[in-house]
Image (spheres, helix red, strand yellow):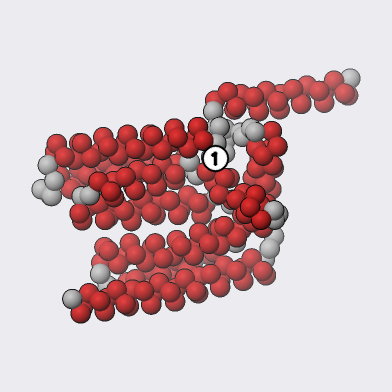
């Protein structure tokens, strides 16, 4: 029991140190290099269109834009600056999640520290956190999916399946690449069965539950933000009409 408490204590210290370092690096990156990538302004335009016209183009996943626009809606700040604040927070939490995953898999504080330091200073992760981009929202939810998948493989609890389903569904709502996790989770269940840690019937039932909750999350979220096919057609038609109007103006 004493060894376990010591490990948890060291883990907490490692997470704290790496998160403070990671936040500082990300914040300094934004302060000294505030220039945003071109996609940032594209996202800003679509957030404004979504708010003003209740329409969102199908090429943009809705959850990322919802999260990035929250500070501007709550605190009435600039959309891009508010979104960067969200990414700074998510980028710091990503470091903690990565360290926790390493701790669950290997139980070694040296690997946790090494992984945490790499996550805190990795150029791509730092850039994602200091920019108005969708990557951090995707990474946050996909890493949560991995974390609770590891926990599920240890205890096979239905609670962890539910969390994995919701988080992986949210990841898909941030970036379409997250769809691959549906197959990854199936493979994990297959390995679990091959190692005789679960029965075929239970693995099949748990995967069916995962798919059901995954689908339900997608439907409920899209319904709640009114992200529907007819809305997609409306905005595409709007752009077509705008193009036609411009052509008529020059005639």
Q: As displayed, is residue 105 above or below residue 16?
A: above
Q: Position of residue 241 (x, y in %)?
A: 74, 22
Give the left or right position of residue 107, taking residue 34 as reference: left
Residue 243 appears at what percent x and percent y? 76, 25
Q: Which residue is drawn at the image coordinates 44% and 69% (left, top)?
A: 118
Residue drawn at x 41%, y 38% is: 217
The structure residue drawn at horizontal position 58% and vertical position 45%, both measured from the top left corner, is 65
Q: Residue at x 19, y 40 (%)?
A: 203
The x, y position of residue 117, in whole percent, is 43, 72
Q: Which residue is mark 1?
A: 62
Would you place residue 17 above or below residue 101 in this image?
A: below
- Residue 201 position (above or below residue 99): above
Q: Quadrant of the N terminus?
A: bottom left
- Give left or right: position of 210 versus 234: left
Secondary structure of residue under mark 1: helix
The quadrant where residue 240 appears = top right
Tell me if residue 250 can be seen: yes
Image quarter of the C terminus: top right
The total number of labels drawn is 1
Q: Residues within 10 Å of mark 1 (few under 14, many from 20)?
A: many
Outermost residue, front side: 74
Residue 198 in picture, x, y percent from top left: 13, 46
Q: Is residue 132 visible?
A: no
């Amino acid at each position: 029991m004493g060894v376990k408490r010591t490990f948890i204590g060291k883990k907490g210290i490692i997470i704290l140190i790496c998160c403070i370092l990671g936040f500082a690096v990300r914040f300094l990156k934004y302060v000294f290099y505030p220039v945003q990538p071109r996609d940032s302004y594209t996202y800003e335009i679509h957030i404004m269109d979504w708010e003003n016209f209740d329409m969102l183009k199908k090429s943009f996943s809705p959850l990322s834009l919802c999260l990035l626009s929250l500070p501007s809606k709550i605190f009435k700040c600039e959309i891009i600056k508010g979104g960067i604040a969200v990414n700074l927070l998510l980028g710091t939490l990503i470091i903690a999640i990565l360290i926790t995953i390493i701790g669950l898999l290997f139980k070694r504080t040296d690997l946790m520290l090494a992984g945490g330091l790499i996550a805190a200073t990795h150029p791509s992760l730092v850039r994602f956190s200091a920019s108005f981009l969708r990557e951090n929202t995707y990474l946050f939810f996909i890493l949560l999916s991995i974390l609770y998948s590891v926990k599920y493989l240890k205890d096979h609890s239905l609670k962890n399946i539910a969390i994995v389903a919701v988080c992986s569904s949210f990841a898909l709502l941030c970036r379409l690449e997250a769809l691959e996790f549906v197959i990854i989770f199936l493979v994990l269940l297959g390995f679990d069965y091959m190692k005789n840690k679960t029965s075929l019937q239970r693995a099949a039932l748990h995967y069916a539950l995962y798919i059901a909750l995954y689908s339900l999350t997608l439907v409920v979220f899209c319904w709640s933000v009114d992200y529907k096919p007819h809305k997609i057609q409306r905005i595409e038609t709007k752009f077509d009409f705008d193009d036609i109007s411009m052509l008529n103006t020059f005639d």
